[in-house]
Amino acid sequence: MRTVQPLAVLVVSPSPQSAATVSGMLQGISIDVLRSRDCGTAFARIASSKVSVVICDAVLPDGTWKDVIEFMWRVESSSVLIVTSELADEYLWAEVLNLGGYDVLAQPFDRAEVTRVVTSALGRLLVSPGGARS
């Protein structure tokens, strides 16, 4: 019998409030919300667990979102990356998409936008070849 792994969102931010906010906004979805405060702890979580979506601050204490996406490529993660920033603009959005990220979320977070982007990312994972969780 196949078992389905629980879906998980990893929030990478030095602010503990970011993960708490995202968790509260995603209460209606059956999903675990995990937190890492920097690249180093994020790398460990991505490598050792089934993380579906990574929501990452643009700038972290020990790197940037680009370091996170490069690590995801190296370990061939099927997770999708969503970048967050108070300065979310067209330039950041274009850069994220051009480097393989999924989307950008502006801070402060908007409940409807967080829910829309995360559920869309999860839907993409579940229907894309190699992205299905089993």
Image: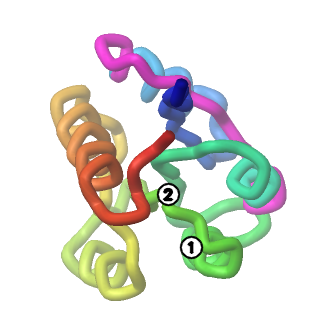
Circle 1 or circle 2, nearest the eye: 2
Indicate whether residue 38 is drawn in magenta. Answer: yes
Mark 1: which amino acid? Ile
In the figure, is residue 30 to the left or right of 128?
Answer: right
Q: What element carries label 1?
A: helix
- Residue 11: quadrant of the picture: top right
Q: Mark 2 points at which residue?
A: 79
Splitting the image into 4 quarters, where does residue 114 fall?
A: top left
Q: Which mark is residue 103?
A: none
Q: Please say whether residue 67 is visible from this viewpoint.
A: yes
Tag 2 secondary structure: loop
Q: Is residue 95 magenta?
A: no
Tell whether 43 sits left or right of 117: right
Q: Which residue is drawn at 52% across and 30% down?
A: 2
Q: Which colour scheme is used?
A: rainbow
Q: Do the residues labelled 1 and 2 touch (CB within 8 Å)?
A: no
Q: What stretch is highlighted in magenta?
A: 26-41
Q: Where is residue 120 in the image (x, y as percent from the top left)?
A: 21, 46
Residue at position x 69%, y 54% in the image: 46
| Gap between marks 1 and 2 measured at Cα | 10 Å
Residue corresponding to mark 1:
69
Crowdedness of circle 2 by 10 Å Cα count: few (<14), some, many (20+)?
many
Spot occupied by residue 92 in the image (x, y as percentages of width and height): 33, 76
Q: Which residue is drawn at 82% across and 60% down?
A: 40
- The N terminus sits in image quarter: top right
* Percent of width and height locating residue 90: 20, 76
Depth check, front residue: 93 or 3: 3
Instruction: Give whichever of 40, 46 is nearer the camera.
Output: 46
Amino acid type for the residue under numbered disc 2: Ser
